[in-house]
């Protein structure tokens, strides 16, 4: 199991566009992927409802976890999404 703590940098937190991008990326992985806020049970990172249900805000830290081949690369990609301050604002 590979885990990584990541601070959410998006000003809107893990909502709407950042959450959709996060879930789409996680869903492409062949392994189980979870995301958790401190003190809460991990949720399926491939479920938009579960991810939005975290109600994660800017500046909060989450723990990402995955196991299997490519887990480290996946967590790096997901960390990159959460570390962006903005997501495609037009």
Image (cartoon, rainbow, N blue to C red):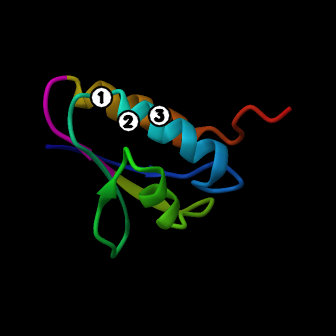
Q: Is residue 14 left or right of residue 6?
A: right
Quadrant where the image shows the N terminus: top left
C-alpha separation, residue under disc 1 versus residue under disc 3: 9 Å
Q: Badge 2, how many Cα within 10 Å: few under 14, some, many 20+?
A: many
N-terminal of the pair, mark 1 or mark 3, is 3
Q: Is residue 12 left or right of residue 32?
A: right
C-alpha separation, residue under disc 2 versus residue under disc 1: 6 Å
- Residue at screen point 62% across, 56% down: 13
Quadrant where the image shows the C terminus: top right
Q: Badge 3, how many Cα within 10 Å: few under 14, some, many 20+?
A: some
- Which residue is the site of mark 1? 29
Q: Is residue 29 left or right of residue 14?
A: left
Cβ atoms under marks 2 and 3 closer than 8 Å: yes
Position of 19 relative to 69 (above/below): below
Outermost bottom residue: 39
Q: Quadrant of residue 72?
A: top left
Cβ atoms under marks 1 and 3 closer than 8 Å: no
Q: Is residue 12 magenta?
A: no
User: Secondary structure under badge 1?
Assistant: loop
Q: How many marks?
A: 3
Cβ atoms under marks 2 and 1 closer than 8 Å: yes
Q: Is residue 67 magenta?
A: yes
Q: Position of residue 67 (x, y in %)?
A: 15, 38
What span is colored magenta in the figure? 64-69
Residue 26's disc is 2
Residue 24's disc is 3
Q: Position of residue 40 (x, y in %)?
A: 33, 73
C-alpha separation, residue under disc 2 versus residue under disc 3: 6 Å
Residue 79's disc is none
């Amino acid at each position: 199991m590979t885990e990584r703590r990541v601070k959410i940098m998006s000003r809107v937190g893990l909502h709407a566009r950042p959450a959709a991008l996060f879930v789409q990326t996680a869903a492409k992985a062949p392994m189980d992927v979870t995301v958790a806020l401190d003190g809460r049970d991990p949720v399926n990172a491939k479920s938009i409802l579960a991810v939005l249900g975290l109600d994660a805000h800017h500046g909060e830290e989450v723990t990402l976890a995955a196991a299997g081949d490519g887990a480290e690369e996946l967590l790096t990609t997901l960390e990159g999404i959460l570390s962006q301050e903005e997501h495609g604002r037009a």
